[in-house]
Image (cartoon, rainbow, N blue to C red):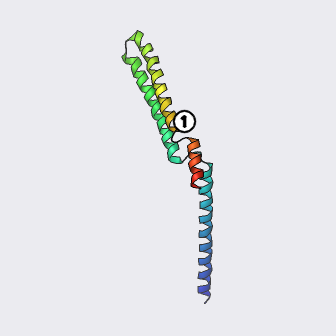
Amino acid sequence: MKKKRSESVWESKYEAFDSMLLRVSKRRKESIEKSMLRPLHQEIIRCIFIVIVMFFDTFVLLQLLVDVIHPFNYIAFFVVLSVMLYVEIRIYGSIWGKNGCWSLDHYKKTKKGNK
């Protein structure tokens, strides 16, 4: 008889511990979601975009300095740098800028609309 009672006590403690873990994990998940500015996948894609742009700018411009004839390589360097920076800033602004599809304002509006 005592054996059954001890099993039920352990089972009830296990169930209590399990329910406590579920509550804590839900609260932790909600607090993490509330603290994030954007969803995690958007942040990862933004960081990957920045890294790719930096590598592209560096290697293309260095290759341009090496391949083009001496007096024209500096002129070509600054012209290509200006064009590339303008295009990259426009792309970044259209995606993550003030009116972009993944902007913070857009995310906050959709987040409030879902609640």
Q: Position of residue 75 (x, y in %)?
A: 44, 13
Query: Where does residue 34 sit, x and y in percent of width and height?
Result: 62, 51
Residue situated furthest bottom in the rendering:
1
Quarter where residue 4 is shown: bottom right
In this picture, is 94 found above or below 76? below
- Kind of residue at disc 1: Gly
Farthest residue to the top: give it: 71
Identify the image quadrant of residue 29.
bottom right
Q: How many marks?
A: 1
Q: Taking 32 as reference, is 45 left or right?
A: left
At horizontal 49% and vertical 25% (from top left) the residue drawn is: 86
Mark 1 secondary-structure assignment:
loop
Residue at 45% from the left image edge and 34% from the top image edge: 52
- Please say if 13 is above or below 42: below
- The residue that disc 1 covers is 97
Q: Nearer the viewer, residue 4 or 89?
A: 89
Say which residue appears at 39% left-offset and 18% top-offset: 66
- In which quadrant will I find the N terminus? bottom right
Nearer to the camera, 72 or 62: 72
* Neighbour tally class for label 1: few under 14, some 14-19, many 20 plus, Cα within 10 Å: some
Q: Position of residue 55 (x, y in %)?
A: 45, 30
Residue 39 location (% of width, % of height): 54, 48
Foreground residue, 48 or 103? Answer: 103
Quadrant position of the C terminus in the picture: bottom right
The residue drawn where x is 41% and y is 9% is 71
